Amino acid sequence: MLSNDKKIKMCYLKKELPLLNEPLTVRIKFRKVGNLQYISHLDLQRTLHRILVRAGIPMWYTQGFNPHAKIVFSTPLSVGAQSECELLDIRIDRKISCEEIKELLNREVTDELRVLDVYIPDTKFSEMVWADYTIEIFRSDFSSDIAEKLNERVSREELIITKRTKSGEKDINIIPLIKSFEAKLSDDCQKISVKAMLSVNPDSYLNPEHLLSAFDREYAILTGDADKIVYTIMRNATYFADGVTLFK
């Protein structure tokens, strides 16, 4: 644990920390849950930058007329989705331990944005290929065979969605972007629970919302009384290309 005197030094006198020979990349793992699921990725970027500054983290800044800290996120999380495995990289220019960074940051955040780990990475975000999600859809009148229909639909060779790209709208087959999928219906037929591993590769990212929209188009799982249909999306973990080894 840091003493109060050292915390003050970290926050307000960070220039007294020894300079590193060259900037060092540090990776921060954090959660984004609860009410924070409704803030945009841009707002999250701004918020975390303020938190890093307020915590006194000795970030490295670019040179020139408009100096700025280099903060890189692994993959965007859509509004309305929660996560227990968000990652961002920063660069620091002074000597400070990963444990000290974690403690300083957690003094500035709520439990909904808790920092879970801080470490020196030996991987690149481009090596992250898959993400594991838990999706729950609540409704009072699901048909008893809806989970079977969803599982069967994903087993086919093609499921087309229309995706907006920089060059316009484009039809995409999302089946190759689904590594695993299992839907289960609760005994009272009021909740569908889905475990799915979806692509988070920058060139072939599959937003879980797009998957739900495709199902809704064919099976109307989200159609009806809007006040009685609720769904949640949680990103649990990310993986390398083998879909087994956790990304870190």
Image (cartoon, rainbow, N blue to C red):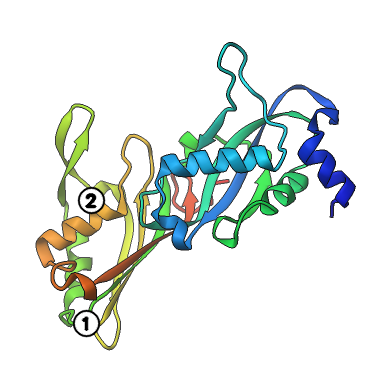
Q: Say few, some or many: other residues with alpha carbon within 10 Å of mark 1 (under 14 / 14 to 19 / 20 or more).
A: few
Left or right, 122 with reference to 214:
right
Does the rendering let one see residue 155?
no
- Give the residue furthest to the left: 218
Residue at the (64%, 23%) spot, across then down = 61
Residue at the (15%, 62%) spot, across then down = 216
The image position of residue 132, as x and y in percent, is 42, 57
- The kind of residue tagged 2 is Ile
Residue 172 is tagged as none
Q: Say few, some or many: other residues with alpha carbon within 10 Å of mark 2 (under 14 / 14 to 19 / 20 or more).
A: some
Left or right, 111 with reference to 198:
right
Disc 1 to disc 2, how far (Cα)? 29 Å
- Please report contact status of discs 1 and 2: CB closer than 8 Å, yes or no: no
Residue holding disc 1 = 140
Residue at the (49%, 39%) spot, across then down = 45
Left or right, 152 with reference to 6:
left
